[in-house]
Image: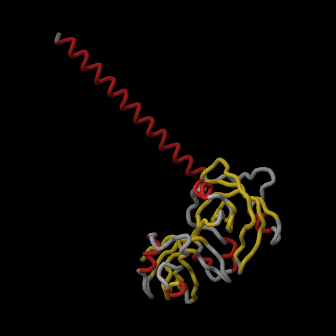
Amino acid sequence: MKKLLVLIMALVMALGCLAACGGSNDSATNDEATKDEAIAGPDTEKSEGVMTYAEYAAAALDSKVVIEAYVQGKQSWWDNKGTFYTQDADGAYFLYEMPCTEEEYNQLTVGTKIKVTGYKTEWSGEVEIIDSTFEILEGNWVAEATDVTALLGKDELINKQNMLVSFDDMTVVSIAYKNEEVGNDIYVTVSKDGANYDFCVEAYLTSAETEVYKAVEALKAGDIVDIEGFLYWYNGVNTHITAVTAN
């Protein structure tokens, strides 16, 4: 009887070891798959009839454009229209008031790949796509911010328009609410190397309840900060801030 119990216990321990070893290998495989997916990045091949970013950038204003990109930010939805920041491996696209239902807007989460057909236009320097239609494609990618600090004050900065970007060691000059009303946009003037730049906390993108809105409210003149945001353009660089870190 004692021998039987010993055999049973040994069998149980052996099975437990096999299960544990199997679980460990599965975990390692999953980790490697996640790592490979992150390295792969966004698709660089475009479908037939879809423009590369270079072709889009070269297209004339008011011309029809067809692009593929990944949603990186969602600014607002109202009256069955949504406004989005999107990006591919080479550049970014601002989709202004793209027709979509509220259900479709909710489906277009950050990282979602879409194909968009619309018209390229410009408003106060901001190049955008309007009167568009879209379809959701297979694929998911979220961009990391590109450091463009060295491009401040240079003509080349506009080539990064609408991308998720970062700026290091910016000095806060002033902060003001739009119409002096808390909850509205926050106008943030920052300086670098003696030049001032007007950035913005866009309330439709990052409302008064968000961490970034509260963090900017707490800043004061003279603070040194790192900033991330979408490189929006309004008569010059007017970054829509999505993160701020005090140094």
* Residue at 67% across, 65% down: 92
* Residue at 67% across, 54% down: 114
User: Which picture quadrant has residue 14?
Assistant: top left
Give above or below for 137 relative to 23: below
What colouring method underlies this structural image?
secondary structure
- Residue 216 placement (x, y as % from top left): 46, 78
Residue 30 in view of the camera: yes
- Residue 204 placement (x, y as % from top left): 56, 72
Q: Nearer the viewer, residue 70 or 16?
A: 70
* Residue at 80% across, 68% down: 58
Give above or below for 31 relative to 239: above
Give above or below for 25 relative to 5: below
- Residue 119 placement (x, y as % from top left): 78, 66
Residue 141 in view of the camera: no
User: Which picture quadrant has residue 237?
Assistant: bottom right
- Please state, as top left, top right, bottom left or bottom right, where the C terminus lies in the image: bottom left
Q: In the rendered view, does 34 fall on the left or right side of 113? A: left
Q: Residue furthest top?
A: 1
